[in-house]
Amino acid sequence: MSGIMRLYRAERWLYLHKLTPLAMIIKISIRCVGGVIPYQADIGKGTFITYHGLGVVINKRALIGENCRIRQHVTIAANDEGAPVIGNNVQIGAGAVLIGKIVIGDNVKIGANAVVLHDLPSNCTAVGMPAKPVKFNYAVESSE
């Protein structure tokens, strides 16, 4: 687990246990180190933010699944309708932007600098502005 995620886990624990002033101290530390990762955001276990969270901004209403990989300079932003909900095992490329009340399925790969404005189904690779699925990654089942 990266240092930034250790700090996030500590601030999240403090927040959930009604120790918000201490959580805010860690929040300020994270902001000074690299990005904005608020303790209110719900980030699943095993999620890894590369480069110590450099330039990463996550809205406090975001929901991020388990075992995701978020690269540097990613923005996960809310709008008036809501914040992104990201499934498990999602990889988000450097500089990608996810905006609004969108749902990203499990096992999705989002390319670098993609701008995601709409839901993405599970098991796909999406690129572009706006991001669109360009490949579907379905496992081949054996008939034995």
Image: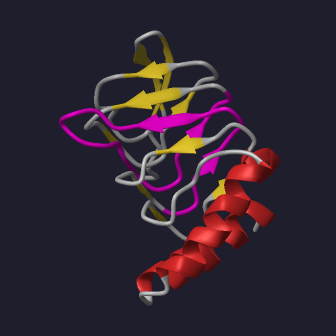
Q: Quadrant of residue 93?
A: top right
Spot the residue most to the bottom: 17
x then y, percent, for residue 103: 30, 41
- Look at the magenta stretch and give its main secondary structure: loop
* Magenta segment boundaries in residue numbering: 66-94
Foreground of the two, 140 or 82: 82
Q: Is residue 26 above or below residue 62?
A: below
**Residue found 62% across the figure and 63% down from its top:** 27
x then y, percent, for residue 117: 34, 22
One can see residue 49 in this view: no
Does residue 1 appear to the left or right of 15 in the view shown?
A: right
Coloured how?
A: secondary structure
x then y, percent, for residue 35: 67, 45
Look at the image and tell me in which quarter the N terminus lies.
Answer: bottom right
Residue 131 painted magenta: no
One can see residue 26 in this view: yes
